[in-house]
Image (cartoon, rainbow, N blue to C red):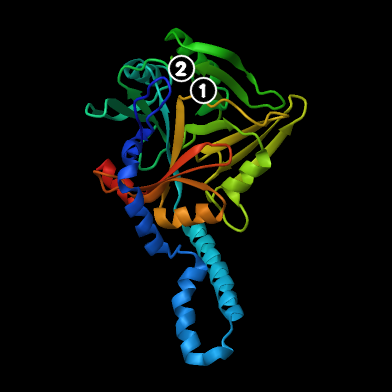
Amino acid sequence: MARIMPMTASSIRPSLSSLRFCRFCVSHSSSRKFASFHLGTVPQMQSFGIKASKLLREKGSNFSIGAVGSMAHASTATTQENVLDWVKQDKRRMLHVVYRVGDLDRTIKFYTECLGMKLLRKRDVPEERYTNAFLGYGPEDSHFVIELTYNYGIDKYDIGLAFGHFGIAVEDVAKSVELIKAKGGKVTREPGPVKGGNTVIAFIEDPDGYKFELLERGPTPEPLCQVMLRVGDLDRAINFYQKIFILQAYGMELLRTRDNPEYKYTIAMLGYGPEDKSAVMELTYNYGVSEYDKGNAYAQIAIGTDDVYKTAEAIRLGGGKITREPGPLPGISTKIVACQDPDGWKAVFVDNIDFLKELE
């Protein structure tokens, strides 16, 4: 759902699917106007100006400016309450994770043969010099999937230190590792219990150097189960994804936290459903590390929403940074809004109905 545009040594095109970042500027101003009209996001005192003038005429000089200010404050509180109520009812789901690869065919081969994924669809856009491939363990309308982006002529990216890994739930980690080795895959951590716990895990690397954690679990409807990202302030990140001020910026639920003082890190699991049935975000804080190099390989997560305009309002009221105003993408009808969390990680919210139409 997000397009990653070709890059030079100093610049990167954003990503694709139904998301066309290179053309954002075309509809930026018009979508902003529409968003303001739709949500009434004009500053409160300005919007109260007309009403105040009318009331002053009707009630005379006894109607004070202080009353107008009180009305504005009450209206702001009402707006926040309405948006919060809406966020709680919004049907949100993690749709896919987007990142760049240097050889699309090589990566598809590895994911299908070694990781057991299926190639769900593929799209080439020669005029923009990129190709997308969607892979996963089930259809996109019900599963969290991977969106790979290959930009013509670029065969290598810097993954950086901030990105951690993707998680895949398997019933037998040892057997999965044997298969991966037989196919020539790189195993960086042999099967065994996780440090400080009992879950059996292993780590592997794909041809581009992205790490995958294999977690031993029983049957699950969502094998592609985690995206791990490192953050510089865990409390700040949790507040943003779960609740900032009185608003849930991303509307996620904090599922659990685990502190590992022996190994000097803390993790937090957040998502729209339980870990054994849904894809989740694993945020990791390493003691004393407040900043990381993000590189240029990992792009973003796409999340479904019933209304991108109301989602944008919730993100603003929650202190989030909108990087692409809500509205339809140029050339297609899919509506999106793009934003950043406090650590600079990007996310794109995609209209649920428009997304399903795309899949048709």
User: Can you name the residue that lies furthest to the right here?
Assistant: 262
Q: How many marks?
A: 2
Relative image position of residue 28 (x, y in whole percent): 35, 48
In the image, 309: left or right of 178?
Answer: left
Which quadrant would the N terminus be assigned to in this image? top left
For badge 2, the amino acid type reads Asp
Give the secondary structure at mark 1: strand
310 or 184: which is nearer to us? 310
Give the secondary structure at mark 2: loop
Relative image position of residue 128 (x, y in whole percent): 26, 29
279 or 2: which is nearer to us? 2
User: Can you name the residue that lies furthest to the front here?
Assistant: 61
Do tag 2 and tag 1 residues touch (Cβ < 8 Å)? yes
Q: In the image, is residue 20 above or below residue 32?
A: above
For badge 1, the amino acid type reads Phe
Mark 2 — residue?
Answer: 206
In the image, 307: left or right of 89?
Answer: left
Q: Is residue 275 visible?
A: yes
Relative image position of residue 211 (x, y in whole percent): 52, 21
Q: Is residue 253 visible?
A: no
Q: In the image, is residue 141 above or below residue 204?
A: below
Indicate which disc, 2 or 1, sits on the residue closer to the N terminus: 2
98 or 337: which is nearer to us? 337
33 or 87: which is nearer to us? 33
In the image, 6: left or right of 311?
Answer: left
Relative image position of residue 50 (x, y in whole percent): 44, 77
**Numbered mark located on residue 246 in the image:** none
User: Can you name the residue that lies furthest to the left here?
Assistant: 127
**Numbered mark located on residue 212 in the image:** 1
Q: Residues within 10 Å of mark 2 (few under 14, many from 20)?
A: some
